[in-house]
Every structure is written in C-alpha cells, then in structure tokens.
Image (cartoon, rainbow, N blue to C red):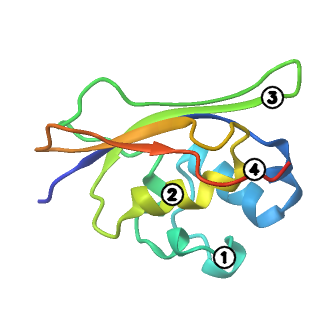
Amino acid sequence: MGMYTEINFRAEMVPEWANDPKVGMAFTALREGSGYGTPREILPEHEFFDCDRWASVASCGSYYFPLGNHNEWVHDYQGGYYWSFRANLKNYDDEINKFFDWVDPYIREGEGTFLGYSLYEQGNQPIHFFKKGESRK
C-alpha cells in the first residue's frame, strides 16, 4: 500500500520543446502515459527522469482521488500548445516537485504565474507551484 498525492497542472507550453528530440519524446511519453521502459539515455538530463514513476506523473490514478483525472494537450490554430492534467501517484521519489522543476523552462507564462498544485491523500492544504524562471522562447 502507500499514500497517494494528487497533482494538477495547466500551462501554455513554448513550442521550442519540439526542437530537442529527447524533450519531445519525454513530453509525448508523459502525455500518453507510455514512458515505462524507456532507456534512460534517450531521456533529457534531469533528476525527474531518474524517478521510478516519472512516466505516470500525468496519467496515474487511484480510488483515493476519484473521477477527476484528465490529460489534455491542445495545439490551437494560432500555434499555442496548452497542457492540462490532473492525476495522482505515490510520490515516493518527490516526482511531483521534480516534474515542476523540469517543465518550468518549457512554460510560456511569466515568472510567478500559478501552474498547479499537489495535495497529499491525507492533507488538508495543497502545495502551490508557480513559474520560477525564464522560458525558452
């Protein structure tokens, strides 16, 4: 058994993520929940991808956070990329904090923009995440 932590994320992504094959593959795997078994050497250099459950951050679910999971990726007619998901997982390796750290440069919004939250299964207060640094524009 173990305790689950909910993650909620939504942001406009910079399109340059697609210019790096490793980053593009990682985004695709996260959106599709298909990254299990991916060789580490073809993933981006970040501690997030050393976590056992990195591939399920955007798609894992449990009965403890029912009926709210989604994973949406939208490319609009003006060239914007928008990603929104809600999932929950056993956050044993601090996957959620590491995810927000890794994805930060690929977010278009400015510094200080609210990006989402995490909420521990037995928690009463979520942890909020905000855009930290500059985007890769």
- SS class, disc 4: loop
Q: CA distance from mark 2 to mark 4?
A: 15 Å
For the point 27% across and 57% down, which residue is it?
A: 90
Dot 4: few (<14), some (14–19), or many (≥20) neighbours within 10 Å?
some
Badge 1 amino acid: Glu
- Which residue is more in the foreground, 50 or 126? 126
Q: Position of residue 41 (x, y in %)?
A: 68, 81
- Mark 3 or 4 closer to N-term? 3
- Which residue is more in the foreground, 137 or 58? 137
Is there CB contact under 8 Å for labels 1 and 2?
A: no
Task: Give the residue at mark 4.
Answer: 135
- Mark 2 or 3 closer to N-term? 3
Q: CA distance from mark 2 to mark 3?
A: 21 Å
Dot 3: few (<14), some (14–19), or many (≥20) neighbours within 10 Å?
few
Task: Give the residue at mark 3.
Answer: 80
Q: Is 91 left or right of 44, judged from the image as shown?
A: left
Is there CB contact under 8 Å for labels 2 and 4?
A: no
- Which residue is more in the foreground, 32 or 107? 107
Badge 3 amino acid: Gly
Q: Position of residue 104 (x, y in %)?
A: 62, 53
The numbered disc on residue 45 is: 1
- Mark 2 or 4 closer to N-term? 2
